[in-house]
Image (cartoon, grey):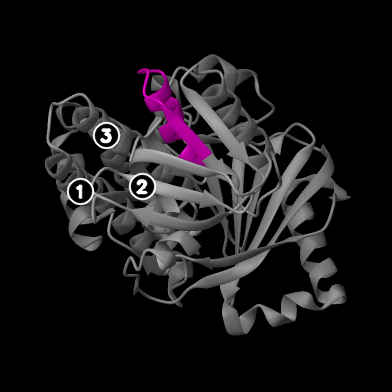
Amino acid sequence: MSAPYDVAVIGASISGATAAGFLGREGIRVALIDRDDFPRRKACGEGLSEIAIEALGRLGLGDELCSTESAAFFAYKIDLGGRDVVLSSSNRQRLKGMGIQRWHLDRLLVEHARRMPTVTHRFGSGVDGILESEEGYSVRLKSGETITARRLVLADGSNSGNAARLKIPKVIKGRALWGISFLLEGSFRRQTGEVVVILKDGFEINCTPVGPRHLNLAFLAEKDQVSPLQNPAWRAELLAEAKRKCGFEGEPTGKPLQIGPVGSGRRPYSHRLIYLVGDAAESLDPIAGMGMTHGILTAECAARHLLLDLRGGMTREEAAGAYQIAAKRLARPYRGFTHLTASLLRSPARRVLVPCLAAAQMPEMVRASLGVGRQGRSAMAMVMHLLLTFAGV
């Protein structure tokens, strides 16, 4: 089989476009495939951590990211019902991340990948079949075209039909979350630099400013608790509460988007020499805001190992095996951070625990343990990193 492409990447959202960008700038011939046209709206909390911002800077997108409509945030305000707790660093001006619409972020990443001379895109046609051989892969599109490539990356999300088609095993870990995502347009009465998390009994509302005139609201709950959100009167009441607590005046634009399932499935990062990145391998509970970070970092990690393979630094088998180990090691502390955050904020004792931990600067110490290199961590941050890694196993 003669393969005109080095790598076929199925899925052109955050993980897929990031992987294609890292590979394309190294001259690797990439076919970037997606059933949708880009950009498009997608249900998402739309919070990008400072760790992910640094990774996109390594991709060469720092200036473009800063010039894209977004909203920087420096703290999280946890609404416990009658009491607010602000989680921030001692330096209130330390960036924690930015809110950015997926429409804009996907567009930025896809356009960056498409500027690479060796990256070709095939959008608007789903995959109809995948044939594996010793030489590589033949990806048959529903349009009738067949893409042949030496290597294959799956970046098509937690509900990946291609992973199911290739019989890649999926393990269910914990309960999945479902919900509804809204994009509101209007104006802020005040700019607080905060992401607001409103905790209710049985569900939560994540409120992320994504620009000077836009607010993202994501309602999340377990599946059996989502049905009441379909009640227009109650939903309008919750929207009004969220807008009031965010200091925002405006109305939803377009239809609400369905979220889920998220935070429950886990697949191997490498299976039969196929690379899986982002949600295709594992979807993190969105409450900790690390879903997009995980997707970007695993895409960067996959690109690094594919380069070693394609340039002869490792055999194909060695590179895929090394990626599996590296991606699992990378994901564990983020998974642990997510598990601990979810357990804390959804605990019946959260009204006592959250203020105590905030006063002790524990959340800031936890995030610091994730965000810097090993040599830059304090002894306490190193210990915290190890605890998160253990919690994420």
* Image-based side of 336 in relation to 109, left or right: left
Residue type, label 2: Tyr
Q: CA distance from mark 1 to mark 2?
A: 28 Å
The secondary structure type at the circle numbered 2 is strand
Q: CA distance from mark 2 to mark 3?
A: 15 Å
> Looking at the rendered structure, which numbered label has been put on residue 137?
2
**Residue 280: where, in percent of width, then height?**
42, 56
- Mark 3 or mark 1, earlier in chain: 3
**Residue 144: where, in percent of width, then height?**
60, 49
* Image-based side of 288 in relation to 78, left or right: left
Q: Quadrant of residue 60?
A: top left
Q: Quadrant of residue 206?
A: bottom right
Residue at screen point 28% across, 51% down:
133
Q: CA distance from mark 3 to mark 1?
A: 17 Å
Q: Nearer the viewer, residue 19 or 9?
A: 9
Residue 21 on the magenta segment: yes
Residue 298 on the magenta segment: no
The residue identified by callout 1 is 329
**Residue 338: where, in percent of width, then height?**
38, 58
Q: Is residue 338 above or below residue 325?
A: below
Q: For label 3, count other residues whose C-alpha is less than 10 Å away and answer few (under 14), some (14-19) or many (20+).
A: many
The secondary structure type at the circle numbered 3 is helix
Residue type, label 1: Arg
> Mark 2, mark 3: which one is toward the viewer?
2
The residue identified by callout 3 is 306
Residue type, label 3: Leu
* Image-based side of 310 in relation to 252, left or right: left
Point out the stretch of residues depicted in magenta. Answer: 12-32
**Residue 75: where, in percent of width, then height?**
52, 40
